[in-house]
């Protein structure tokens, strides 16, 4: 088993992770908190929903939290001088009032720490294959219809790192993506709103037997800067698992926090995630086997054979 030696002298970096919670399974904060803490970051989970299990099961019970409940929790942290964080990770949100309450919270956290890094997974929905190979993909919105507008106007301009899937970046930018040129253009649109790093976690063109991740990074918000961009392609595990986006966002935050550039951070995150997914698939399990994959999480393996990384100027 691999060993990581942590710095026991200085303060441990702190993360506020705002995502869903499930009693059973590994999605949202149940997934992210395990990964962040395993890799050495103190993590305070704040729940946006509290469900019995993820929505891939036939039955789900629980509740979605409101903006008023968010304000109440934040007030308690503020009164005790506990609202001090180095990193903010936001994933699935269940209600419009809660989502709208995040913008003032982010600004308040930045007042406490101007160097705060905000990693945002703008969970809106996804795109699924049609019933036949020739049929168009089906886009599914998971959240209330108000969410895209709230994200565009209030949340995205505050993000340092954005990790949408193809459907989500198309929804946020109104740019339909059918080529790498389109993906680069959509990323530039987000850069123009103040987002320095964008990772499209899934692209649905090219080989259907591969996953395609597209990253784009600018060093500053200076007008006219040409982004550093890259594509990572890797063999796909022919199965669907819940929580992979949550895991990727948490892993990406960890490697960025250690000073890795965006390309290396994405490569390490994807390598660990591929190992987790392959182990889960081989075992015939529905839930990600995170605990069993500790070694591959702490020390990311190489990407699977057949993977490719291509870098270029956007």
Image: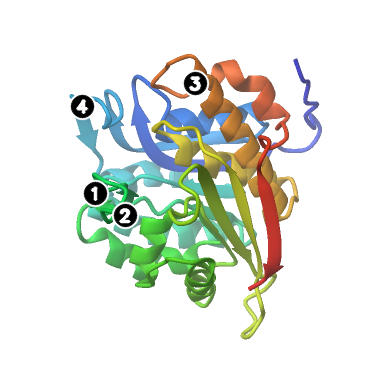
In contact (CB < 8 Å): disc 1 and disc 3: no
Image point 61% across, 85% down: which residue? 223
Q: Which of label 4 and label 1 is nearer to you?
A: 4
In percent of width and height, residue 122 lies at 40, 54
**Residue 77 can be seen, yes or no:** yes
- Give the residue pinned by disc 3: 280
3D distance between C-alphas at marks 2 and 1: 6 Å
Q: Earlier in the sequence, mark 2 or mark 3?
A: 2
**100 sits to left or right of 78:** left
Residue 313 sits above or below residue 25 on the image: below
- Give the residue pinned by disc 4: 60
Label 3 residue SS: helix
Q: Which of label 4 and label 3 is nearer to you?
A: 3
Q: Residues within 10 Å of mark 2 (few under 14, many from 20)?
A: many
Which residue is more in the foreground, 85 or 258? 258
Quarter of the figure with residue 155: bottom left
- Give the residue pinned by disc 2: 99
Label 4 residue SS: loop
Q: Which mark is residue 95?
A: 1
3D distance between C-alphas at marks 4 and 1: 16 Å
Quarter of the figure with residue 43: top right
Q: Which of label 1 and label 3 is nearer to you?
A: 3
């Amino acid at each position: 088993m691999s060993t990581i030696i942590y710095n026991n002298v200085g303060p441990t970096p702190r993360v506020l992770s705002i995502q869903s919670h499930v009693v059973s399974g590994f999605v949202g904060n149940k997934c992210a908190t395990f990964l962040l803490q395993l890799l050495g970051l103190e993590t305070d989970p704040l729940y946006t929903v509290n469900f019995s299990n993820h929505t891939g099961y036939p039955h789900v019970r629980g509740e979605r939290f409101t903006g008023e409940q968010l304000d109440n929790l934040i007030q308690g942290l503020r009164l005790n001088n506990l609202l001090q964080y180095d990193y903010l990770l936001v994933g699935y949100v269940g209600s419009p009032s809660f989502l709208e309450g995040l913008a003032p919270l982010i600004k308040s956290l930045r007042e406490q720490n101007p160097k705060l890094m905000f990693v945002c997974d703008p969970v809106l929905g996804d795109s699924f294959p049609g019933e036949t190979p020739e049929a168009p993909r089906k886009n599914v919105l998971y959240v209330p219809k108000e969410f895209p507008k709230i994200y565009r106007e209030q949340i995205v301009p505050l993000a340092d790192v954005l990790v949408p899937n193809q459907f989500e970046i198309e929804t946020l930018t109104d740019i339909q993506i059918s080529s790498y040129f389109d993906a680069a253009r959509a990323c530039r649109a987000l850069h123009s709103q103040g987002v320095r790093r964008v990772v499209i976690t899934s692209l649905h063109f090219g080989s259907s037997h591969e996953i395609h991740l597209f990253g784009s990074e600018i060093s500053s918000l200076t007008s006219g800067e040409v982004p550093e961009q890259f594509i990572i392609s890797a063999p796909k595990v022919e199965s669907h698992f819940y929580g992979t986006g949550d895991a990727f966002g948490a892993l990406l935050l960890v490697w960025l926090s250690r000073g890795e550039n965006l390309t290396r951070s994405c490569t390490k995150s994807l390598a660990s995630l591929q190992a987790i997914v392959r182990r889960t698939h081989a075992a015939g399990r529905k839930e990600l086997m995170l605990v069993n994959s500790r070694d591959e999480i702490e020390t990311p393996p190489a990407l699977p054979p057949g993977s490719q990384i291509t870098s270029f100027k956007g």
